Image (spheres, rainbow, N blue to C red):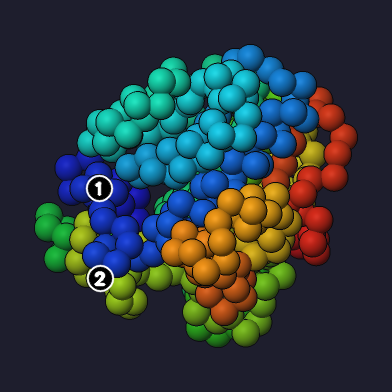
Amino acid sequence: MAHALYDPARGYYSRVPKIGKKGDFFTSVSVGSSFGQILAYQVLEVWSSLGYPEPFHLIEQGAHEGRLLVDILEELKLLQIECYQAIEIVCIEPFDRLRLLQREKWEGLKIPFRFFSDWSEVPQEAFTGFFYSNELIDSFPVDLVTYQEGGWHEKRVICGENFADNRWDLRKITEQNPLFPWLSSIPEIEGYTTEIQRTAEAWMKSVLRGFKRGVVLIVDYGYPESVYYSRERTSGTLQMYQNHQKRMDPLLHVGEQDITAHVNFTELYRKGLGEGAQFIGYTDQGRYLTGMGERWLCEISETHPADSVVFQKKIREFKTLTHPEMMGNQFKVLGLIKGTVEEKNWKGFRFGSTIPL
């Protein structure tokens, strides 16, 4: 999965895949600018809760071509120019092609920005600010495990000289295998196959260690562990997408199709607390954007007549992002605090936040 998605020459993401109607999949960003505009209110809330720091680090990973950040900052410039002027953009981006596209979009913002290839380059406690990611962790490489003939096996890939020669290989998991401690949460049912996300847990640790003070917001497909490893979910969540069609085999069309697995939010939550973070909230995207977007909706209503093209477009985007049968329930939102932050009731988590267990 790491090779198929992140190989510098032939990996899916190194080729800058298209997103939206003409691409392989939709995201909240491809729906329109409303998602980023609402997140601008979250940026402002974090800035004030941190005591208006300067510089205020705005950090994104998985920025793709950089459109989401533009949507956020264009709205923020209208909301609070002082916050806008305090921002320093930080982007975690390994691919040179994407960095060039991001630079092209961000240079017009007249805000300083810098890049890191990954979190290993970031000094400990380097940032005071706000980190956010949207549909990032679902693309992290996972380990596949399957329960067969009364025991757990790791479902590995033997790589051939060409992508077409790749094939599956089952290896029995012993107590010495690093996957063994994770198996206690998974039901022992013949044929049960699922994912273990060790890379996501390690990533969470790296992100929090990069902060002196700040807020981390993760938006992604996923479930709490009780749902992820429920007895009914016998086939796991690994999915492949190409031209908006769901594919079944990750060993086919390598480098030409997206490969994703849902996020285990319980592991991120536990790792966050283990690294000294505080829990803000966990909810679905519909509830989060409804709570966070109240002022944005009022501004839209006051600025544009209800029968105007702009108003109707924004309402359609908001419904797509929040409706339970569209994107509202598919995506989950997790918020964590690192360091001393002013106590407050976070607007995005005021409608039905739970602990992801």
User: Circle 1 is placed at which residue position?
Assistant: 16
Decide: few, some or many residues near mark 1? Use Cα within 10 Å; few <14, some 14-19, many ≥20: some
Q: Which numbered marker is on residue 243?
A: 2
| SS assignment at label 1 | loop
| SS assignment at label 2 | loop
Name the side, left or right, on which 39 lies relative to 287: left
The three-letter code of the residue at mark 1 reads Val
Residue 337 percent location from the top left of the image:
74, 36
The three-letter code of the residue at mark 2 reads Asn
Residue 317 percent location from the top left of the image:
50, 64
Q: Nearer the viewer, residue 354 or 3?
A: 354
Q: Are marks 2 and 1 in contact (CB under 8 Å)?
A: no
**Is residue 6 among what the camera can see?**
yes
Residue 23 percent location from the top left of the image:
26, 63
What distance separates the C-alpha of mark 2 from that of mark 1?
Answer: 14 Å
Q: Nearer the viewer, residue 144 or 310?
A: 310
Report the residue at 54% width, 31% height from top: 77
Report the residue at 63% width, 58% height from top: 301
